[in-house]
Amino acid sequence: MRKIIVSFLAMFLLTITSSQIVFSQTTVIFKPNGTIGKDAVVLTKEYSNFADLNFGTQTALKMSTWTWDGALFTERSLIQFNELESIPTEAIITDVKLKLYGNFDQEGNNVYPGSEFNQYSNSVFLQRVVAAWDEDSVTWNTQPTTSTSTTQIIIPNSEGQYNWNYTIENSDELKAMVQDMVSNPSTNHGFMLKLLSESTYRRMVFASSDNLDPTRWPELQVTYSYNDTCNSNFSYTMDNALDPTTLTFNAKVDAGQHIWRYGNQSLSTASSFTHTFTPTNQCQELTHEVIGTNGNCSTSINLYICDNNQDTTSIDEVNSMDNAEVMISPNPSKDFWNVSINSKEKIRAEIIIRDALGKVVLRDEKNIYIGENNIPINGKDLNKGMYIIEIKGKGISYSQKLIKQ
């Protein structure tokens, strides 16, 4: 019987630890509409019950202090991006932009060239909200508390009466806020916008997610890095030195969903198991992963098992990409993946998705044209866990892990 070698066969008991951690970078843009958006205006006015009324469907986010029929009134606005929960909690936020778009409102901003109210600064605070609120019931009297620490951000005076846009970018404060909202989803209560000085006559106006113009809905752009290869270790033993093809694997972590694969073959879903390998003329990759209860990949490691005539340093890359470039995002995902294929020629490609045990859960064929092709993959009906996507065609042999949250 030909022997197989696992890394170095000098020892019968080895502990392998992955030292290479691969981070992928993803940019997501959230521009919620009136259905999934969450924003509201809270208003108080002298000699009225406005402080007890809800204004959750306003087409504008208003921050103002003015007079109305001789009575003083003040407005503040709340906004929350619930879509942040689609980003893995382990992600590292590298960049954030919050884009607010002006609105043609009959009142408009008070600071702009030629305004008679230019002496009244309409600078606005963006503060982090630290308590829960409901868009359909929040009022001035029930508005949530905010953090007034140094993390609040100032939006400067407006430069136009109507349709004045402002982007908060290159802000370490905003990045820190969003990082904590992603790492601790239960703390994501959004932001409050309020005037620095709530004295007459000051007003700043932006469009809300209920605005009739979709190009003016508030927009949050987040770039993050995520460790989608992960880092882990496990040990294996050869039960019988005379039969080195039989190995027992022992994961260092028992909890979670374990997935062991050898090439395209599923070996086990247990934390520890024994398997007898049939030596071949090529090395095969052994992969161990652990999927946590939140659906994220918590551990992963790769190991090549070969016969003794094969040099492990000469293993070819798994993906062969002569005719195209492939990118898949977002990954992990809750519902959908987008497969982007930039092809040098028109080809016919087969797309296969297998579950952790190798069962085909999706198979499709697509015409791929010269240039960029975007193919949506609907994963709504898939269970949480790990899947393998394979794309095959002329000049393309591609596979990658997909994580369904």
Image (spheres, rainbow, N blue to C red):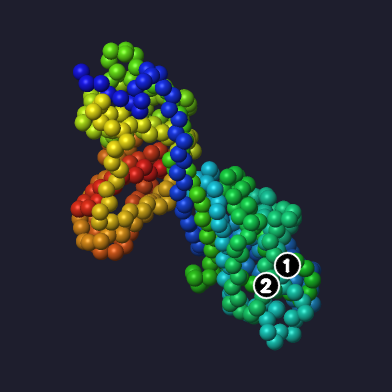
Residue 317: percent from left, percent from top = 30, 43
Residue sitting at x 53%, y 70%: 216
Residue sitting at x 36%, y 47%: 379
Disc 1 is placed on an element classified as strand
Image marks 2 and 1: residues in contact by CB distance under 8 Å: yes
What amino acid is found at the position of numbered circle 1 in the picture?
Leu
Total labels: the figure holds 2
The quadrant the N terminus occupies is top left
Q: Is residue 73 above or below residue 268?
A: below
> In the shown orientation, is residue 373 left or right of residue 44?
left
Residue 354: percent from left, percent from top = 30, 40
Disc 2 is placed on an element classified as strand
Viewer-closest of 1 and 397: 1
Mark 2 lies on residue: 204
Residue 239: percent from left, percent from top = 34, 14
Q: First in sequence: mark 2 or mark 1? A: 1
The label number, if any, that marks residue 195 in the structure image: 1
What amino acid is found at the position of numbered circle 2 in the picture?
Met
> In the shown orientation, is residue 233 left or right of residue 94?
left
- Give the image quarter of residue 128: bottom right
Q: Residue furthest bottom?
A: 114
Q: Is residue 68 above or below residue 87?
A: below
Viewer-closest of 313 and 145: 313
The label number, if any, that marks residue 285 in the structure image: none
The quadrant the C terminus occupies is top left
Distance Cα–Cα, label 2 vs label 1: 8 Å
Viewer-closest of 144 and 330: 330
Residue 323: percent from left, percent from top = 25, 56
Residue sitting at x 65%, y 50%: 132
